[in-house]
Image (spheres, rainbow, N blue to C red):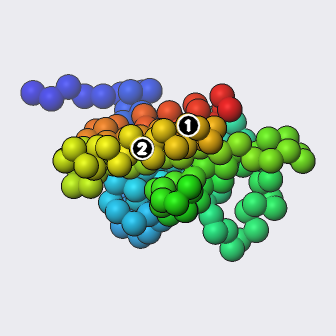
Amino acid sequence: MTERVFGFDLLAQQAAEHVAAEVSQMAAHFTYGDTPIERLLALALMIYDQYRYSAGTAAAGVVFMPDDNGLVERFPRAMRVERQVDVGGWRVDFLIHVPNGLDGPDKLFIVECDGHEFHERTKDQAARDRSRDRAATVNGIPILRFTGSELWRDPFGCARQVFDLSGRL
């Protein structure tokens, strides 16, 4: 026999079902990213940001580039996400720009979404990634790397780590 849920527990369950349906609809049309794990992280960043904003713990804080809707002007202090950018002679999945005051240059960090097919499968792939990590570190650009498994298991947690780093730069 199933236990009946009432009151706040029922409200939490209904809200979760409502949000799950909305996320499924959004995912069907969300195209920001070249691979499924990149799209998953980008959507998780957007949803995590909306959650923070609606919970009153932060102002709207993420804008996806290029932005044709004037969001950069409306939210000048928002974290900006740019995809497939050339950094140091290689293409990164996401370059994150964190505004540094009103006139200071943005602080930057890189986010990589490492699917098994192109990362860590061979020694050459691992060596290439480590070489890129060292080059970015030498240039003062931190890197967050997520495996595809991490992203599929906990996209919201990965998004939280991106926002955590953006707040610590």
Q: Position of residue 56 (x, y in %)?
A: 68, 34
Q: Is residue 90 visible?
A: yes
Asked if residue 64 lies left or right of residue 104, the reply is left
Residue on which the image places disc 1: 137
The type of residue carrying mark 2 is: Ser
Q: Is residue 83 visible?
A: no
Q: Is 100 rendered above or below residue 74? A: above
The circle drawn on residue 131 is 2
**In the image, farthest residue toward the left:** 1
Q: Is 90 rendered above or below residue 100? A: below
Foreground of the two, 133 or 77: 133
**Which of disc 1 and disc 2 is earlier in sequence?**
2
Could you say whether the residue bearing mark 2 is in a helix, strand or loop?
Answer: helix
Give me the residue at 30% from left, 28% from top: 5
Q: CA distance from mark 2 to mark 1?
A: 10 Å
Asked if residue 88 lies left or right of residue 60, the reply is left
Could you say whether the residue bearing mark 1 is in a helix, strand or loop?
Answer: helix
The type of residue carrying mark 1 is: Thr
Give me the residue at 81% from left, 61% from top: 73
Give me the residue at 46% from left, 41% from top: 133
**In the image, farthest residue toward the right:** 103
Foreground of the two, 150 or 92: 92
The circle drawn on residue 18 is none
Give me the residue at 90% from left, 47% from top: 103
State the image quarter where residue 150 is shown.
top left
Q: Position of residue 84 (x, y in %)?
A: 50, 63
Asked if residue 119 lies left or right of residue 7, the reply is left
Q: Residues within 10 Å of mark 1 (few under 14, many from 20)?
A: few
